[in-house]
């Protein structure tokens, strides 16, 4: 330590010349801590560390500096670049003046600082990341309706297990699942069958983020098992993992919003507002592949009479009952929309005219057998259905006008079923 003291003046000048200079506009009496103000304070703490007079001062000032930059979210790379800048400037000055006497001692001095700072930063960073993750879990836990957040909950638990692995330093095989397809979050993504979500850019972005996250985690495990595990590399990898995790949380939140806005609150079927988007997608697919699809439009017969006789609350129960009939009669790949009131639209991907007629008749027959019992009343209802094969060729325009044309055509078929006596398929 006494050797380094000979160079304190030069170290001080190097820090002043090359350490970042930011002037805070914050008033002294302000209760808020601006980032620029934090950088100004960081500069003082950084200089205090380099000019420490004893080993105890070094330990204490290292702890103070690292705690400060963690609390104010100043990146490790920022601190590291400042340290490298100072040592390069100092060594450059010594080489220029041909002062080689203690050059190795100076190099060791800064290397020891780097190691202490890096090791402590990793420890503090992992502790803060764990706390953030546990807070997220506690927030998710009290949510009334988690929807997709239950899968994000599994992801957060995976992050905590990775932190455990690094902190425990056993470096055995008790690390979280590295294969992105086999972790609980990945299994959910792989088994998701909700087509209107899978086709969104948010779901696709989620897949990319998740794969990258596991790639980073594999490198974390590899580093930990290595004889030359580098805390600086672990910091870099874990900071990137935290970033990807935050982005995954954002994408899950978007999917939750889509799920919320896409579902009819009464029947839990898709809403009409999503119909145009899915129709455009299906038209594109049909045009590219040559595989056509079909539309089915349903309308409950004499539904106004149900409302007038039993009230709208009972009418709502009938609507929910019919939505169950649709879900039980159709395939998982089919899109079912509550189109408005007692009208329902079904989009049948890769379905021809005969297949559409068969499915529509299945719905009609199932509906005729339904009986809704409320108190002492037994309510039977029927449905009229129009079907339309959607034939797309190279010249078909993919726009709103084309969608409206097909909706009008299937609506005309539904009207024909009504005209011909109801409780039938056209």
Image (tube, rainbow, N blue to C red):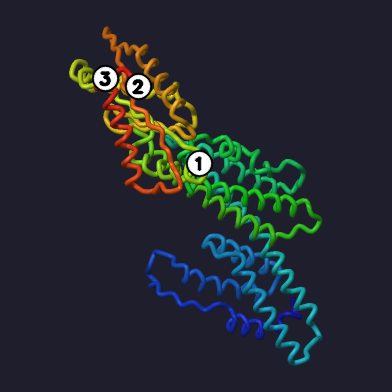
- The residue depicted at 47 percent of the width and 45 percent of the height is 287
State the residue in front, 329 or 254: 329
Q: Residue at x 77, y 73 (%)?
A: 108
Up-down relation of residue 234 to residue 85 (above or below): above
Question: Whole-Å distance between the Cαs marked 2 and 3?
Answer: 10 Å
Residue tagged 3: 420
- Mark positioned earlier in the residue sequence (2 or 3): 3
Residue 107 place in picture, x, y as percent:
76, 76
For label 1, the residue is 290
Q: Describe the element under mark 1 as helix, strand or loop.
A: loop
Q: Residue furthest bottom?
A: 97
Q: Quadrant of the C terminus?
A: top left
Q: Position of residue 266 (x, y in %)?
A: 33, 29
**Residue at screen point 54% across, 44% down:** 134
Q: Against 87, is 267 above or below?
A: above
Residue 299 or residue 272, whichever sits in front:
299
Q: Is residue 33 above or below residue 127?
A: below
Please tell me how crowded label 1 is: few (under 14), some (14-19), or many (20+) other residues with Cα within 10 Å.
some
């Amino acid at each position: 330590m006494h050797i380094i003291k000979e160079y304190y003046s030069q170290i001080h000048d190097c820090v002043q010349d090359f350490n970042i200079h930011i002037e805070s506009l914050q008033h002294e009496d302000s209760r808020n801590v601006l980032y620029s103000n934090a950088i100004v304070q960081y500069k003082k703490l950084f200089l205090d560390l380099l000019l420490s007079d004893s080993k105890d001062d070094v330990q204490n000032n290292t702890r103070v500096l690292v705690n400060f930059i963690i609390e104010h979210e100043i990146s490790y790379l920022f601190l590291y670049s400042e340290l490298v800048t100072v040592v390069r400037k100092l060594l450059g000055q010594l080489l220029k003046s041909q002062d080689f006497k203690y050059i190795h001692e100076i190099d060791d001095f800064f290397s020891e600082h780097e190691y202490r700072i890096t090791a402590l930063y990793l420890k503090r960073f992992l502790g803060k990341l764990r706390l953030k993750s546990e807070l997220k879990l506690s927030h998710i836990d009290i949510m009334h309706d988690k929807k997709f957040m239950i899968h994000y909950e599994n992801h957060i638990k995976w992050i905590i297990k990775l932190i455990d692995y690094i902190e425990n330093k056993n470096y055995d095989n008790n690390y979280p699942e590295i294969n992105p397809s086999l972790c609980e979050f990945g299994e959910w993504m792989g088994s998701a069958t909700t087509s209107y979500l899978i086709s969104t850019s948010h779901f696709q972005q989620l897949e990319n983020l998740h794969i990258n996250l596991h790639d980073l985690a594999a490198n974390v495990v590899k580093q930990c098992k290595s004889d030359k595990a580098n805390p600086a590399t672990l910091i870099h990898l874990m900071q990137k993992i935290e970033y990807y995790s935050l982005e995954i949380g954002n994408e899950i939140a978007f999917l939750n919003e889509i799920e919320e806005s896409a579902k009819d609150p009464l029947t839990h079927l898709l809403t009409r507002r999503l119909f145009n988007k899915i129709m455009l997608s299906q038209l594109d697919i049909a045009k590219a592949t040559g595989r056509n699809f079909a539309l089915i439009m349903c309308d409950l017969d004499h539904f106004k009479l149900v409302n007038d006789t039993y009230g709208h609350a009972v009418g709502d129960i009938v609507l929910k009952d019919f939505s169950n009939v649709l879900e039980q009669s159709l395939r998982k790949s089919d899109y079912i929309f509550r189109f408005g009131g007692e009208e329902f639209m079904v989009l049948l991907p890769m379905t021809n005219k005969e297949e559409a007629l068969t499915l529509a008749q299945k719905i009609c027959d199932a509906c005729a057998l339904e009986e809704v019992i409320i108190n002492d009343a037994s309510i039977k209802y029927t449905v009229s259905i129009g079907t339309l094969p959607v034939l797309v060729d190279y010249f078909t325009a993919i726009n709103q006008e084309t969608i409206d044309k097909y909706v009008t055509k299937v609506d005309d078929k539904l009207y024909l079923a009504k005209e011909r006596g109801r409780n039938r398929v056209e």
